[in-house]
Image: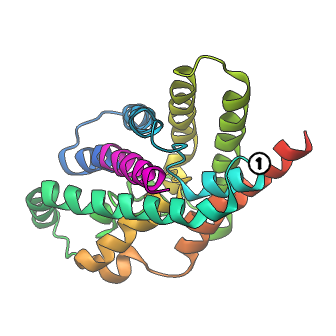
Amino acid sequence: MKKECLGEFIGTFTLVLFGCGTVGTAVLFNTFSSLFEVALLWGFGVMMAIFVSRKLSQAHLNPAVSVAMVLSSKLEKRKLFPYIGSQFLGAFVASILLFEMFGSAIEQFEAANNLVRGGIGSEKTAMMFGEFFPNPGYVDKVSINWIQAFFLEALGTFMLLLVIFNVSDNVKNNDLPPVLIGITITILICLIAPFTQAGFNPARDFGPRLFSYFAGWNKIAIPNFEVILVYVIGPITGSMLSALIYNLV
């Protein structure tokens, strides 16, 4: 069990470091010219995270995936909470490292844009940790409430799990599933990120979100219970529905 927990920790740490780091460079340095570039790097990040952890654990790296795997009898029930705990811890520790890397750049961005950390508008920097709806980068183009955001996060996770179930059962080349999962993440981010930032992963969201709360963003990081519903309950709901359909079919 220790080996598997280590695998989930390392994999989720890698996923958040690469993925949230990509968001950080996009926000702070305007590095990319399109959402597709960010989505593509997220996909590569997920792919690499699976490769570095799959020899140690099942490389779920996502509580929603672990819940679905328990429901489909692909993970023992006794392993669920150790897996989830390791995933949240990996995401939280990665957030600490990202804050140390980008700390001075965040301060300069805040000063240049007249932002007070924890104040109105500081979602523009908090979004490199936790997620928001609508996406702070698209607030002038998108209007969305928490019910719509919940549906999109559930839908995205539902589709992700359908792919995971099918590639794990039907693809015989062991090196191909991580690639296909990474491609799926890229596509889903392109579709859903303008609305919700496309989380699909309670550990990836709440671990960094919790860190940003204590790092000075306060209530901006956790403004209400709706963000928990959208980014934690939403993905788990989608994954459970996917597992139900998988079990039936």
Q: Position of residue 60 (x, y in %)?
A: 54, 47
Tell me which amino acid carries mark 1: Ser
Quadrant holding the C terminus: top right
Residue 214 visible somewhere in the drawing: yes
Name the side, left or right, on which 94 lies relative to 59: left
Highlighted magenta segment, given as a residue range: 1-19
Q: Mark 1 points at which residue?
A: 242
Residue 196 picture location, percent across and down: 52, 56
- In the image, taking residue 155 as reference, residue 228 lies left or right, namely left
The overriding secondary structure of the stretch rendered in magenta is helix
Q: Measured from the top left, where is residue 171 in percent x and y?
A: 67, 21
Residue at 15% of width from left, 55% of height from top? 102
Relative horizontal placement of residue 206, taking residue 177 as reference (left or right):
left
Q: Kindly identify the residue that appears in the image at 70 percent across and 48 percent down.
A: 158
Front residue (pair 136, 197): 197
Between residues 11 and 218, which one lies in front from this camera angle? 11
SS for dot 1: helix
How would you rate the neighbour count of disc 1 (Cα within 10 Å): few for under 14, some for 14-19, many for 20 or more? many
Answer whether residue 118 is visible to the viewer in this image. Answer: no
Residue at horizontal 65%, vertical 37%?
A: 164
Q: Does the magenta stretch include residue 171?
A: no
Measuring from the top left, give residue 173's x and y in whole percent: 59, 16
Front-most of 44 and 124?
44
